[in-house]
Every structure is written in structure tokens, then in C-alpha cells.
Image: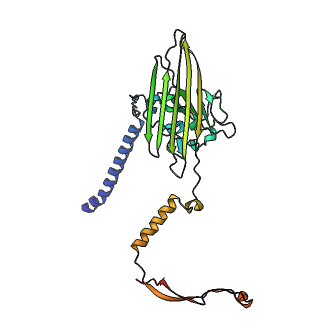
Amino acid sequence: MTRALIARGRPAFRVALTLSASLAASSASAQVASEPVEPAEFRVVGKQDPAGLLPDQKVPRAQSAISADFIVKQAPTLNAFQLVTLLPGANVASSDPYGLSTSSSLTLRGLGQDEIGVLMEGAPQNDIGYYFAYPSQFADPENLKRISLAQGSVDIDSPTLGGAGGLLSLSLDDPKARPGALVDLSLGSYAARRGFFRIDSGTIGKTGLKAFISYSNTRADNWRGAGYDTRQHIDAKILNEWGAGNRASLALSYNDANSSSYPEPDTCRVERPGSRLQLRQKLHRREHQLLAPVPRAVPQPLRLRTGAPRAERSAGARHHHLSSVRLRQFAPTGRS
């Protein structure tokens, strides 16, 4: 009898012990939840660009820029669109590697070129008809001091008509305070050659005026098809500075180019005699013919009858001809 009571009492003791443990755990969790949690500390450490390739931006908007230190490290034939291809949001496409063709496009955050304003020294460069800009007509890279690209809608005071997508601003380099000259010669593939010459006058007497003038000549063969592109460009700038930050400048840019347009390839151009692609196809077929087994030729008789038409023979016309000619033609049978 005693054993039965003890056996029956064990489960009750276990249930009570479990309930007490669960209550203790719930009270402990309530105490932990009531205690304030200290926020985690995140530290962001930034370092300045030691080479000065990307200037610091202090304007309250999304804007990126490249400096002259970055531009001089690039190929001298690149235009302004090709120089900003690494900036955030920019997507650049060009039909030639030298920036001579007018078929260059710039999209910014998905918006097309007709919605991007372009300024050079504060003057608008977009076409008034289609709102396009032609980067091959801009200043030479050696004369650019800074190229900034603002993502998003432009300011109200910007002298642009289609600037919903962004603004590309080009700033010319200031004339040097001391007289000097710069000569840059370049050679490249597709018979590309370029010469750049710049002369700085330095400060002219006690007037405070200083100026520079540059001339460049570029020529390169088309990378597809016949023809070549040429470009002659002149940049000039006069600057006068006085007082505490006062300055006035006059910039001039002249461009004379002969550029080719690359049409889209189609079947007619591919199959045109003398085209490079057709020559490659002929060489490819010739290689297959050399590798294929040579078919065995079997002589087959072929009778060819020549002579005047029946109407002419009936009219009594005299013709000297062979009545029949027996030829032997070799036709492939397809057996090896």
C-alpha cells in the first residue's frame, strides 16, 4: 500500500518541478527583456585619394568628377564620353576606339543622351535639334582640367534644355603663369597617329593676362571596311585674374573632322566580292575541301549536238557545223 502511494506521487512531484522551472525561466526572460540594449557602434573610415584622381565633392547632390591627373594617364585620343565611362551611373558606347566617330552615346541611370546636358566652360554643347552632344568636337584631353558628371536632374540655373538625366561639365585648363610648350606624339594600331602641340605665353607684362593655344592632328584607318578618319582641332584661352578671386576668361574651340559612319552589317555587304568576311568564308570552305575525302571520278558519256536551228535549216541557210560531238565528262559519284 505504501509503495503504491509512493509510485503514484512521483509523477505529481515531476509536474510541479517542471512548472516551477518554466516559471523561473519566464521571469528571467522578462528581466532580460526589460533591460535596455546598448546600440552597436559602427565606424566608417575613409581615406583621401593620394593621387588626386577623383576630386572631393562638397556639393549637396550626387556628383562625381575626374581631374587632370586622371586624364593624363589615359589614351590621348579618348573623348569626354569615354573618359567618364568609369563614373557611377554612366554607360558609354562608341563605334570606334579612338573617339573620332560621331556615333558615341552616353546614358546616365538609364536615361538617353538627349536628356543629358553638356557644358564646356559654362557654354551648352547640345544640338538644338535633337539635343545630342558630339564629344569628338570637344576640347583635347590635354587641355581639360576637370570633368564632372552630376547624376539626376540639373539645377534650375543651368543653361541646358534637356537635362532631366544629368549634367556633364567640362572645364578647360588655365594658362600657365610661365611661358612653356608641350609636344605629344602618339602612334597606334590601324595606322593611327596623333600630334598635339601647345604653347603657353605666361603672364604678359604687367597686364596680368596669360593665354595658351594648342593644335592637334589625328588620323586613323577604319577598323572595319575601307576609309579613314581625320580630325584637326584648335583650343585657345585667355585669362585675367585680379583682386581677391576675380577672374575673366575667353575660350575658343575650333574643330574640323572627317569621320566615317559604320553601317550595320547585312547579307548583301557580307556576300559582296572582296569583303573580308567573304574571304574568310572562302578560306574556311577551302580548308574543309582540303580535309574532305577526294571523290572518285567516273567517266560518263555526254552527247552534245550543235548546229543551226531547224527553222533556219528548212530555209536553206548554209552553216558549217559539226553534226555531233562526243565528249567525256567526269562527274563525282560521292564515293571515296
Residue 188, above or below 247: below
Q: Quadrant of the N terminus?
A: bottom left
Q: Nearer the viewer, residue 59 or 253?
A: 253
Q: Report the side of 260 relative to 195 (left or right).
A: right
Q: Position of residue 240 (x, y in %)?
A: 56, 15
Q: Quadrant of the C terminus?
A: bottom left
Residue 277 rendering spot, x and y as whole percentages: 51, 60
Residue 209 found in image quarter: top right
Q: Is residue 128 left or right of residue 21?
A: right
The answer, for residue 87, to whether it is visible in the render is no
Which residue is located at x 42 percent, y 36 percent?
Answer: 34
Q: Does residue 333 lie above or below 147 as drawn?
A: below
Q: Does the image show residue 217? A: yes
Residue 136 location (% of width, % of height): 56, 38
**Is 215 left or right of 294, judged from the image as shown?**
right
Q: Residue furthest left?
A: 3
Residue pushed farthest top?
206
Residue furthest to the right = 315
Residue at x 65%, y 32% (from the top left corner): 160
- Front in this rendered view, residue 10 or 188: 188
Q: How many marks?
A: 0
Residue, x 56% and y 43% (percent of image)? 101
x and y percentages locating residue 87 in the rendered image: 49, 37
- Frontmost residue, 273 versus 123: 273
